[in-house]
Amino acid sequence: MTVDTGFSVSGLHLKFQETTREGKDMKSIVIALLLVVPWIANCDEEKEMKKNANILYLHHSTGNCLWNGGIPDWVADYNRTQGTAYGIAEQVFPKNEPYGWRNYPFDYWNIWVNNAGDSAYLEEPTLEMLTQDYDLVVFKHCFPVSSIQRDRDSSNPASDEKTLGNYKLQYAALKEKMRSFPETQFLVWTNAALLSTNCTVEEATRSREFVDWVTGEWDETGDNIFVWDFFSLETDGKIFLNPSYANGEKDPHPNQDFAARTAPLFCRRLVSVIEGTGDQTSLTGE
């Protein structure tokens, strides 16, 4: 017996005759194809969107060492070989004047949480401003952040004292703030490390503890916030900056060799975040 069968998928009406079991199977295949093709097209569109991103790299001197170590050249080479159009711009944040040369957890909290809004605070852009222009914002702290003092009786995000308790409260508030801009991604460096000539064992141990907290608890999968574990690269997984990576016996800035070695690792981590694999790839970029 021959049966005329008609059906519609995505507004397209199809009609044919089922004469055998194979005819019924063909009908199922056609339906599946009509459903899958739009999905494939949508995936291609999403993939295409990831080829373009505006990135802002906020830094002071340590970040500048890696920038000069090859970050813009690496991104340019990647664009050329992969057909992407990632634009990365660098900016000193905060500036020395009028805010002051301080980029510790308190300062990001102060500018982006405590003084949030559509207007700059002491000439420094808020997240409400930055997220209008950038798809991904990178920020970091300079090495004095690792001189962490013992906790007081109570902690306060409005305190600029460098303690674990204050840092954690400031980071908790920053995470909530960054998550309120789900269309923008954030890539946060872990602490820049200090040499054993710059701080005590107790201070460096607290710095390691803060980094472990950031990477193990504060950083969560599934959101728009990611971490690059610079501290572990600088310390080889220990607590002090490896002296062979430093610019001098008492200068914890990265030297040229170390900057040139780690700049590509940062860039790999950056690209993994942009391209949607940031929760699955290494925090160090290795």
Image (cartoon, helix red, strand yellow):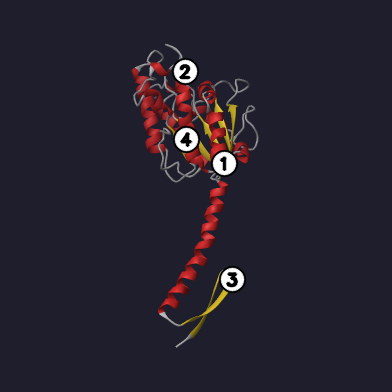
Q: Earlier in the sequence, mark 1 or mark 3?
A: 3
Secondary element at tag 4: helix
Q: Earlier in the sequence, mark 4 or mark 1?
A: 1
The answer to whether the residues at label 2 and label 1 have Cβ atoms under 8 Å apart is no
Q: Earlier in the sequence, mark 2 or mark 1?
A: 1
Residue located beneath label 1 in the image:
84
Residue located beneath label 2 in the image:
255
Q: Position of residue 164 (x, y in %)?
A: 40, 27
Q: Residues within 10 Å of mark 4 (few under 14, many from 20)?
A: many
Q: Which of the two discs, 1 and 3, sits closer to the camera? A: 1
Is 281 left, or right, of 60 in this rendering? left
Q: Is residue 177 something one can see in this rendering?
A: no
Label 3, label 2: how many angstroms apart (C-alpha)? 63 Å
The answer to whether the residues at label 1 and label 3 have Cβ atoms under 8 Å apart is no
Residue located beneath label 3 in the image:
11
Residue at the limit of the structure toward the bottom, as seen here: 1
Label 4, label 2: how many angstroms apart (C-alpha)? 20 Å
Label 4, label 3: how many angstroms apart (C-alpha)? 44 Å
Q: Is residue 141 something one can see in this rendering?
A: yes
Residue located beneath label 4 in the image:
268
Could you tell me the amino acid type at mark 4? Answer: Arg
Could you tell me the amino acid type at mark 3? Answer: Gly
